[in-house]
Amino acid sequence: MLERLKTRTANVGFFAVGHDTYWHQFEGLLDSLMGYHGILKDMIAGNSVVVKDYGMVDSSEKSYEALEQMKADRLDVIFCNMVTYATSSTFAPIIRGIDIPVVLVALQPLEGMDYTIASTYMQLENDNICSVPEFTSVAVRMGKKVSDVIIGTLRNDEAAAGEIREWCEIAKVLHDLKGARLGLMGHVLEAMYDMHADPTAISAAFGVHVPLLEIDDAIRLYQTVSEQEIAEKQQLILREFDTPEPKSDPVTTKLTEADLRQAAHSAVALDKLVAAYNLTGLAYYYEGLEGSLHRQIASSFIVGNSILNAQGVPMCGEYDIKTCVAMLIMDRLGIGGSFAEFHPFDFREDFILVGHDGPHHIAIADGQPVLRSLLKYHGKPGSGASVEFKIKEGPITMLGITQTGNGRFKFVIGEGLSKKGSIPPTGNTNTRGFFEPTTKEFVKAWVLEGPTHHFALGVGHHARTLKKIADVLGIESVIVKGDQA
């Protein structure tokens, strides 16, 4: 498997709240509570994030001090540890002054008290929920919102641990959206009105920068590629992909040496482009004159794109910057993010093929992906190596990012199943997607939400998490259900 170019991580803020009056009233209570705080800190850190621990915040003065530290630490998510009752003055400065998700965590040390020996001290050790409504109320009064409340027990509570893990994954998405550089190169494929997007609007909504590149930037780097670099990339391609004989589609042939070399040469140029412009991702489309170097390069990026997708750099065809954002979000959640659209239904078995003829996230492939040489790219100029695979069997999630009539962005989210079965041997990715209550009803409900015809496709069921990300970003979202059509 290909290694990621950048580790998925995030900066997570963490602080406990309490009522300072308790400390002189109940000797040892503060130390006991901070012991529980340490247990939760280790639980959070176990999700491959950097934890910034601000300790106990038990007064408004300490809250203001912690706020200044938080602003300097470039946090992505904050967990407020409700270790016991605390007045909302310990929380109000932070929720008012911070503009990232704040999650209240109320995990009791005990599943329940032993009432035969219960005491005020024991109650205060397990009073995690007591001030949660006070905190959520003061957030609303200050025109802010608590992003989530996690309730449960400190030990042996997989549901609570899963909610913490989910927010750590969301933090990784937010971490890499900040200042991401999603390049645009070329132009929209002629007549695709749903693909157009304003780079400033993308920057405003997602906090990313959109460098505008020329195909000549890729050509310049293409011309610096050495024979050794081509040979090394060819070896990597042959290691990662199968190259079988063609089957039923006369457009396909076994991968040719010429197409392998061209794919490798262009893949090295793409690597250099990503490095030269510090790209987090790229959306592109370019045709060029027949026989030109422009067309030769632009039409041979598919293999290099798919490798980069698996390495955590979303590469998106047809100039679709919106789906590039969706692919980045899915990748940083660790669930893939393959470039996809709807292909033909199978009404006999109630599924629809989902896939595309361009870049794919081969890290979520079911088995070894295939390379075929195509004599023509249907609907586009050029020919050459193309990637064919289906994604892993099991739950799948789709994220489409579209725009509404007022120009605002909207997440269209759906969940289904990928099931085993043959796919067309066309040199394109295709997965058998099954949806509830029937695939036809689901697809009807999906298209009525006004999505673009592309979406990012990932593994697992993560609709709820994607909706939380939309809420954090202030973006409209809908989770499509087939029975809403």
Image (cartoon, rainbow, N blue to C red):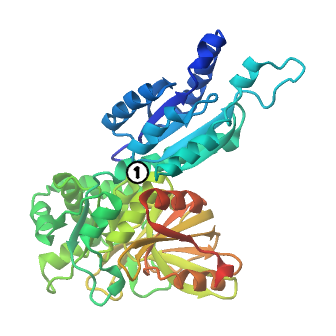
Report x, y in % for residue 67: 38, 34
Other-residue count near label 1 (Cα within 10 Å), few / some / many at <14 / 14–19 / ≥20: many
Q: Quadrant of residue 213?
A: bottom left
**Picture quarter with the C terminus:** bottom right
> Residue at point 63% right, 44% down?
133
> Where is residue 257 shown, x and y percent of the image?
28, 69
Task: Label 1, secondary structure: give it.
Answer: helix
Q: Residue at x 47, y 83 (%)?
A: 450
> Which x, y percent locates residue 147?
53, 50
| Disc 1 target residue | 174
Q: Residue at x 16, y 87 (%)?
A: 290
Left or right? Give the position of 472 relative to 441.
Answer: left
113 or 422: which is nearer to us?
Answer: 113
Q: Nearer the viewer, residue 350 or 227?
A: 350
Percent coordinates x, y for residue 455 in the rendering: 45, 73
Residue drawn at point x = 65 percent, y = 84 percent: 441
Q: Is residue 367 visible?
A: no
For residue 460, above or below residue 106: below
Identify residue type, mark 1.
Answer: Leu
